Image: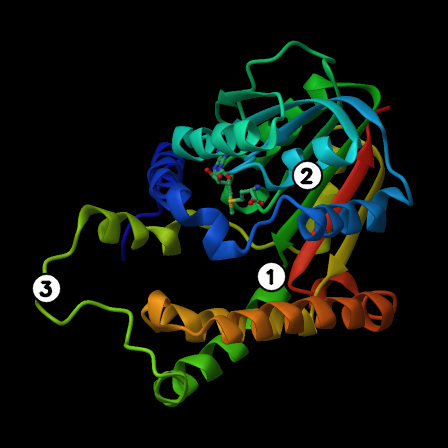
Amino acid sequence: MAAPPTEHEILDVNRRYHDVAAHDYDAKWGIDYGEVGAGQVLGKLTKLLGANPGPYPRSLEIGAGTGYFSLNLLRSGVVGRATCTDISPGMLAALDANARRLGLDVETVACDAAELPFDDESFDLVLGHAVLHHLPDLERSFAEFARVLRPGGTLFFAGEPSRQGDRIAAWPKRAAVRAAPLWRRVVKARPAFPAEGAPASADDAEHALESVVDVHAFDPGDLQRLMQGAGFTDTRVQGEELLANWFGWFNRTLEASANHDDIPWLWFQYAFRGYLGLQKVDRALLEPRLPPQVFYNLMIAARKP
Ligand SMILES: C[S@@+](CC[C@H](N)C(=O)[O-])C[C@H]1O[C@@H](n2cnc3c(N)ncnc32)[C@H](O)[C@@H]1O
């Protein structure tokens, strides 16, 4: 049995994988900095922070990637000044390029979430999206979030896989693997992978790391304990996206099986619009009624006393 990776290895794999992933990250995940993107980001914030969150004069994003959350929040006026951190310099270079294109001013700092190079009590909002599950030392990271927040400051993280939701999401993925050959024939797309024996590129090798960068899935209680252990109050955990997520994973698994350039534009439109429609169904009907752990994504919020 292989030894579990050390903390250092987890950080290193995350940096290398995300450095390579950065160049087509926004296209792969449909990240948008216009009305749709701002609507998505604000929609998540308002679920836990109430209508019209902020404004927060200074925000710090952890694992900011290409800027999905911070750039959309700057554009919407929810944050005044944004500092964006990430372990991957490649991701931050993409974020800087996005900010320049949008005419936004942000500070980017490459660092590990568990060792933040900022003074105590310097931010009004510490936030992140889809990052906690990559962090090898969660206790130390949460202690850092508490340290750099001002008293009364807000903690917000979204897009974290729930343990049960992750298990359930394996079903649509498996179904899509079985359906993929037929789907590729219907949309007339070639398979994605190079012919057997073809030399793998360095990028292929880095992409193969995708399966090892995710180190946690959470139960709501795990996240409550982390927040409370770091001294936060008013701690909340909520689940989001069920049908939207199954639909999304099914389609993404199909898409990953094909040569991207062969997939018709109409397919992407269908997948995107369907996802947005099912998000509305989840929000209106399922999120208020079902327990957080059945959803694919967990989100948390808390306050520093
Ligand atoms: C799934 S991506 C999410 C990016 C962005 N937040 C978004 O929603 O598009 C996870 C990000 O966390 C970063 N990351 C991974 N481990 C980290 C660590 N220990 N400290 C800071 N960032 C980390 C990765 O480099 C990557 O950019």
Say which amino acid is labelled 1.
Arg
**Picture coordinates of residue 302, whole percent (x, y):** 81, 36
Q: Would you identify the image quadrant in which residue 139 lies?
A: top right
On screen, residue 237 above or below 16: below
Say which amino acid is labelled 3.
Ala
Of labels 1 and 2, the one closer to you: 2
**Picture coordinates of residue 240, whole percent (x, y):** 73, 60
Mark carried by residue 163: 1
| Mark earlier in primary sequence (1, 2) | 2
Q: Which of the pair 133/127 is nearer the observer?
A: 127
What is the residue that sits farthest to the top in this orientation? 119
| Mark earlier in primary sequence (1, 3) | 1
**Mark 3 element type:** loop
Q: Is residue 79 left or right of residue 20?
A: right
Mark 1 to mark 2 CA distance (whole Å): 28 Å
- Residue at image position (40%, 89%) is 186
**Picture coordinates of residue 41, whole percent (x, y):** 72, 47
Which residue lies under the disc numbered 2? 72
**Mark 1 element type:** helix
Q: Is residue 33 left or right of residue 134?
A: right
Mark 1 to mark 3 CA distance (whole Å): 37 Å
Which residue lies under the disc numbered 3? 198
- Residue at image position (72%, 34%) is 75
- Circle 3 Cα neighbour tier, 10 Å, few/some/many (<14 / 14–19 / ≥20): few
Q: How many marks?
A: 3
Is residue 71 shown to the viewer in this render?
yes
- Circle 2 Cα neighbour tier, 10 Å, few/some/many (<14 / 14–19 / ≥20): many
Which image quarter holds the N terminus?
A: bottom left
- Residue at image position (38%, 35%) is 15
Q: Would you identify the image quadrant in which residue 244 lies?
A: bottom right
**Picture coordinates of residue 125, whole percent (x, y):** 75, 27
